[in-house]
């Protein structure tokens, strides 16, 4: 067994913890299948050690965005492990939360506790790790889910974000600082009544973000409205996917460039390797009147500090009820928690209405998104394979 795997096993045993690690796994290609020159398939894999140091579960990442060097498994094999206290945990990696599977399989099998780990690049304004994690939890709030997430930490390259979210919605969240910063969030898995807290980072320098390409989005500038409630709408695509923003704001900024944006269609990952359906609409703080600036960093949209939304709601008609809120407060990089969202079926569509329950300052993103909304057919089965071949890096997430 590889030395790193041995060390991970020893850590789990010596510390008497369940340990989940993200690794690169090399598997010899089978005869006749496409293969790289070295004769290996390389998978992004999560492995789980129990308190005795035994390897008890393995999951290979199935949903990809920009990982050209990683191979996609031929089949999806959701994996779980059960702790000695009888709590079953499902395993996610990185962008899995944005897709129908493996989440639907876990939920259909009664799994309500999850570990999510990987190397997710924070992408403005809709793809920041803590916003995605909190949004997925919020969308499944009625299922009483708990989610523990551990992202690869490299602040200057855009990797960051650890969080613990309880079924009640209480959470502890943290973006670590530095080029290779890290932080430890420690709690018991059955303690679900904690007060909501969100840890703030002491940032040595600006965090690096990827930017969403808004070329194919429809957009409209959101005018200033302080004396009365105002509405603005935007539509996109042949099927007229439309969203309406209702708002009232108070501002002291001389200039602001909030835009309402919408997209309905197939999106392609930056490297062109992945095509996936998406419907997204939302209010975004942009750095200019050009929609291409709507992926700008928080530092480029600091006018948000001088704008407060006293009324804010967003409505859209989606192709699926599998939608998640994507929100961000610009002062802390954290999602906005005071929300309500309703989803009502209307013929073949689903009318979604998201409402802020409190005045919001420093709003960067207030959006609703549905990715991979065409649910794939075919039964899936749980797997607990334990064969590990090779490793390039690892990430730790532990429950004590």
Image (cartoon, rainbow, N blue to C red):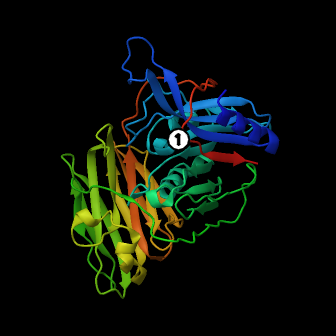
Q: Position of residue 291 (x, y in %)?
A: 23, 64
**Residue 87 lies in quadrant:** top right
Asked where in the image residue 50 lies, by quadrant, the reply is top right
**Residue 361 appears left or right of 164:** left
Whether 37 is drawn above or below 354: the answer is above
Q: Is residue 99 left or right of residue 274?
A: right
Work out whether residue 329 can be spotted.
yes
| Image coords of residue 149 (percent x, y) | 59, 50
Q: Position of residue 135 (x, y in %)?
A: 49, 55
Residue drawn at point x = 40 percent, y = 36 percent: 69
Point 55% across, 65% down: residue: 177
The correct choice, above or below, for 81 with respect to 354 in the image is above
Q: Residue furthest top?
A: 31
* Count of marks placed on residues: 1
The answer to which of 140 and 177 lies nearer the viewer is: 177
Q: Badge 1, how many Cα within 10 Å: few under 14, some, many 20+? A: many
Which structural element holds mark 1? strand
Residue at label 1?
93
Q: Is residue 311 above or below residue 213?
A: below
Q: Could you tell whether 6 is left or right of 101 in the image? A: right
Q: Is residue 222 left or right of residue 11?
A: left
Q: Is residue 112 visible from the viewing direction of this image?
A: no
Residue appearing at x 42%, y 80% in the figure: 305
Give the percent coordinates (x, y) of residue 143.
60, 46
Q: Quadrant of the N terminus?
A: top right
């Amino acid at each position: 067994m590889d030395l790193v795997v041995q060390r991970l096993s020893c850590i789990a045993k010596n510390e008497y913890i369940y340990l989940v690690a993200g690794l690169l796994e090399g598997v010899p290609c089978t005869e006749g299948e496409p293969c790289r020159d070295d004769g290996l398939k390389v998978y992004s894999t999560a492995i789980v050690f129990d308190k005795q140091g035994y390897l008890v579960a393995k999951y290979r990442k199935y949903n990809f965005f920009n990982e050209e060097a990683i191979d996609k498994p031929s089949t999806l094999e959701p994996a779980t492990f059960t702790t000695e206290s009888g709590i079953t945990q499902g395993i996610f990696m990185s962008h899995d939360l944005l897709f129908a599977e493996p989440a639907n399989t876990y939920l259909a099998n009664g799994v309500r506790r999850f570990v999510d780990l990987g190397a997710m690049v924070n992408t403005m304004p809709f793809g920041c790790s803590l916003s995605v994690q909190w949004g997925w939890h919020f969308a499944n709030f009625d299922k009483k889910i708990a989610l523990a997430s551990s992202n690869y930490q490299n602040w200057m390259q855009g990797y960051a974000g650890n969080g613990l979210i309880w079924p009640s919605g209480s959470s502890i969240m943290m973006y670590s600082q530095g080029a290779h910063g890290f932080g430890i969030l420690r709690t018991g898995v059955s303690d679900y009544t904690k007060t909501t807290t969100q840890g703030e980072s002491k940032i040595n320098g600006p965090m690096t973000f990827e930017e969403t390409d808004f070329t194919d989005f429809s957009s409209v500038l959101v005018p200033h409205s302080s004396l009365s409630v105002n509405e603005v709408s935007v539509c996109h695509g042949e099927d007229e996917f439309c969203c309406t923003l209702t708002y009232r704001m108070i501002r002291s900024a001389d200039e602001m460039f909030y835009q309402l944006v919408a997209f309905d269609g197939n999106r392609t990952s930056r490297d062109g390797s992945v095509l996936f359906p998406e419907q997204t609409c939302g209010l975004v703080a942009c750095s200019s009147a050009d929609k291409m600036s709507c992926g700008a960093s928080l530092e480029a949209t600091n006018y948000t500090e001088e704008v407060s939304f006293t009324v804010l709601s967003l409505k859209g008609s989606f192709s699926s009820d599998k939608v998640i809120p994507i929100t961000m407060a610009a002062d802390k990089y954290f999602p906005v928690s005071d929300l309500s969202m309703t989803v009502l079926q209307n013929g073949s569509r689903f009318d979604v209405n998201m409402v802020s329950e409190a005045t919001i300052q420093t709003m960067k993103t207030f959006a609703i998104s549905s990715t991979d909304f065409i649910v794939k057919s075919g039964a899936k089965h749980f797997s607990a394979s334990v064969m590990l071949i090779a490793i390039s890096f690892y990430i730790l997430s532990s429950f004590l």
